[in-house]
Image (cartoon, rainbow, N blue to C red):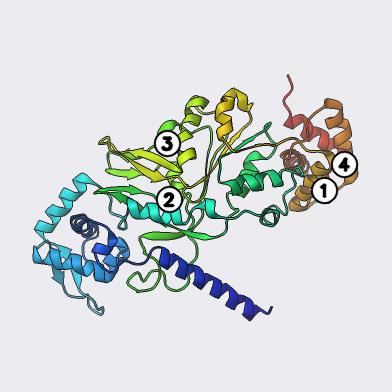
Amino acid sequence: MNAGSTQSAALTTDTSVTDKLAKLAPRPRTLAETGLSDHFTYELFAKHLYSAGVLTLHELSQRIALAGSVLEEVIGFLRQDAYIEVRGAKEGQTGLRYALTDRGRALALDSLIKSGYTGPAPVPLEEYERTTRAQSVHDKIVSQSMMQVKFANVIMQHDLLDQLGPAVHSGRAIFIYGPPGVGKTYICNKLATLFDDDILIPHAISLGDTVIQIFDPVYHHKAEEPGDTNRVMLEHGHDPRYVRCRRPGVMTGGELTLDMLELSYDADSKQYQAPLQLKANNGVFMIDDLGRQRVAPVDLLNRWIVPMENRRDFMYLGSGLHFPVPFEVVLIFSTNMNPLELADEAFLRRIGHKVRFDTLNENEFEGIWRQVCDERGIEFNKEILDYLLKEHYAKEQKPMLPCHPRDLIGLALDMIQYKDENAEITPETINSAWQSYFVRM
């Protein structure tokens, strides 16, 4: 296939994805089609004008992520009730501009007392649930060939890949365990990038007049879109209240507390922020270093019983109102501890797949050692590796871990650079690296 054909095929594929997302979440053309109340939209419009001053219809459309036809309905009401005034276009530009009147500023200030949210218009909770279910990560097929491609350059235990693949494909929670340094976190990070399709994630969702921010650039990485994506007044494309993203991968470790799994409310800004598992929807959510958190493992694990079984979680607002949200994630627990010290057998049975990561054999260790040598631009020396295995690993009965080659070679190179010597690892620098790496009492 020539370059032109390849580009054409890629464009066709991207266009089909764009069309699919547009069908999943079509652009609302009227205020009623947004699913938002008239009053809520009027207040959001007023808050944007209050924070920015004077704006054109195009600028308002960009900020609020609603088409001009929708905002014209809002403008009509606000003008009729004297909340906004119309100003002429700037010199050399076209397009009327809009500003708040004194009455409009009072409306905006009143609205900001209730909620400080001034981002793009949110998506109603019911609509969010529909799109989330339609994009469920559990509907994705994970095949052996897919796993082999993703992990083509990763050296691991020979049967590990065929344990992880069915585990991810199953849609059930996964429990990964094994000693420190065997590559659990690294492999799980690779699993988080297993799915290469684009999905839609809303900037925010609404429950009545309450807005909860979902989109987070820390976890949600925007995908490239064809054409001019800034022109939200165009008729084609998906609802701009959503962001086209790669499927998210959210990882948390020893810092996790139970309150991080609930809605957070900032009293100063008067805004709600979604918890980690809600941001992970349609992707992978991994709890690393299970058992190292400041919360008891049993309490943390029990938090997931209902979501795991029902694919539905429950959130609570400050008012006490609780409501369901979709739980469409590949949930992964990872620990260095004995699973039976963290949970009883009854709970572990609820988790479909338990995968043990173990230490390496000599062939696997050599494969990783070769890879690190290539990455660091040094020549692989079999004699040096044999020396390390015989004089250190064998004599001291140390297990061979996937993290060791990178760490030991790095320490050896530190010594070489310190002595301003040629970049060649010798038995002496290996001895030095070994002494620096392991703690002795």
The disc placed on residue 260 is 3
Residue in the picture at 72% in, 54% down: 152
Q: Circle 1 — which element? A: loop
Q: How far is disc 4 from disc 3 in space, using C-alphas?
A: 48 Å
Q: Is residue 106 left or right of residue 17?
A: left
- Place of residue 199 in the rendered image (x, y in percent of width and height, measured from the top left): 48, 59
Name the amino acid, label 4. Answer: Ile
Q: Is residue 277 left or right of residue 424?
A: left
Residue in the picture at 35% in, 55% down: 127
> Which callout, 3 or 1, points at the residue further toward the start of the chain?
3
Residue matched to label 2:
216
Quadrant for residue 411, please give it. Answer: top right
Q: Residues within 10 Å of mark 4 (few under 14, many from 20)?
A: some
Name the amino acid, label 1. Answer: Asn
Q: Is residue 85 left or right of residue 242?
A: left
Report the mark closest to the observer, 3 or 1. Answer: 3
Q: Circle 3 — which element? A: helix
Report the mark closest to the observer, 4 or 1. Answer: 4
Name the amino acid, label 2. Answer: Asp
The disc placed on residue 384 is 4
The disc placed on residue 422 is 1
- Place of residue 291 in the rendered image (x, y in percent of width and height, measured from the top left): 56, 27
Q: Residues within 10 Å of mark 3 (few under 14, many from 20)?
A: some
> Which callout, 4 or 2, points at the residue further toward the start of the chain?
2
Q: Residues within 10 Å of mark 1 (few under 14, many from 20)?
A: few
**Marks 3 and 1 in Cβ contact (< 8 Å):** no
Q: Is residue 341 above or below residue 39?
A: above
Residue in the picture at 55% in, 29% down: 347
Q: How far is disc 1 from disc 2 in space, using C-alphas?
A: 46 Å
Report the mark closest to the observer, 4 or 3. Answer: 3
Q: Residues within 10 Å of mark 2 (few under 14, many from 20)?
A: some
